[in-house]
Image (cartoon, rainbow, N blue to C red):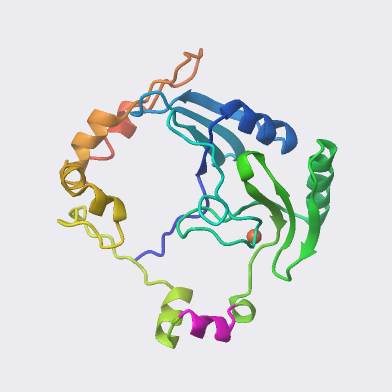
Amino acid sequence: MTTLHPRGVNHLALSTTDMKRQLSFWCDVLGLPLKALYWMHGVDGCFHGFVELADDSYVAFVQHPNNGDEVEFGISHSDGPGGDVRGGTMQHVALHVDTLDELLEMRDRIRSRGVQVIGPIDHGMIKSIYFEGPEGLNLEVACGAAIDERAWIDPEVTGLCGISDEELAAMKAPAAFERPTEPVAQPTTAHPENIRAQRHPESYARTAGVPDDVVWERFSETVPPVQVDGSTAGAGDEERSIATSPRPD
Ligand SMILES: [Fe+2]
């Protein structure tokens, strides 16, 4: 049994109509180094960019040629970090720093580039500053860690969300997973929450039915656009064989 779970965001991908405009903001205003900018794998005419937050954490951008730039508040964008917007869209994103002093330094850096910043505000479990990025992005930088769930899960809100005591207990301590020796088979039908499968039922069923090793071989693109002396150009044979090899006991 393990309690493995994702331990951070590898990359949050934001849609853009102007890659340079977004990169200029994230690199100069926030100070994040550009790490990748290339043709997105498998998508014609699409650019993919990455700026680095930490060794294993990035903010990414996707410039699809069909992206539109109309802002519809309440639909595509919220009109502020507490505004309404369609479910499933990004309401706002908060970037992390370690201390209040670092938060104040970020406030000053952002303001030094002519961007207005609100805060800091002390929320008890985190402290935050708020500002706006290109194309209507709602942005926040926050410091704080180890939220005490005993203090910050409000029974009134829990009840209004329709969460029972048993469900709450399961949410606070998710069940461990016992990984079987053999890989778990692909479900034969799409999950009811998968609205793209409902929209494209035949192509979705076809794609979901392709064996993992075929997907791995057919769609992996490991060679970077620029060859660099001494770099490993893509994954080695050892890594490429992991997907299909039996898992050791
Ligand atoms: Fe927030």
Can you give x and y, in whole percent of width and height, for residue 75 in the image?
51, 54
In the image: residue 196, left or right of residue 14:
left
Which is the main secondary structure of the residues drawn in magenta?
helix
Residue 248 seen in the current view: no
Can you give x and y, in whole percent of width and height, for residue 17 in the image?
53, 32
Magenta range is 153-161
How many marks overall? 0
Q: Nearer the viewer, residue 168 or 193?
A: 193
Q: Nearer the viewer, residue 187 or 79?
A: 79
The quadrant in which the N terminus is found is: bottom left
Residue 184 seen in the current view: yes
Q: Nearer the viewer, residue 174 or 180?
A: 174
Can you give x and y, in whole percent of width and height, for residue 102 in the image?
79, 49
Can you give x and y, in whole percent of width and height, for residue 112 in the image?
85, 38
Q: Residue at x 83, y 42 (%)?
A: 111
Q: Residue at x 21, y 52 (%)?
A: 183
The quadrant in which the C terminus is found is: bottom left
Q: Residue at x 28, y 39 (%)?
A: 242
Q: Nearer the viewer, residue 229 or 139?
A: 139
Q: Residue at x 31, y 30 (%)?
A: 220
Q: Is residue 26 above or below residue 91?
A: above
Which quarter of the rendered image does ligand 1 occupy? bottom right
* Residue 11 in magenta stretch: no
Instruction: Tell me where residue 110 sits by quadrant.
Output: top right
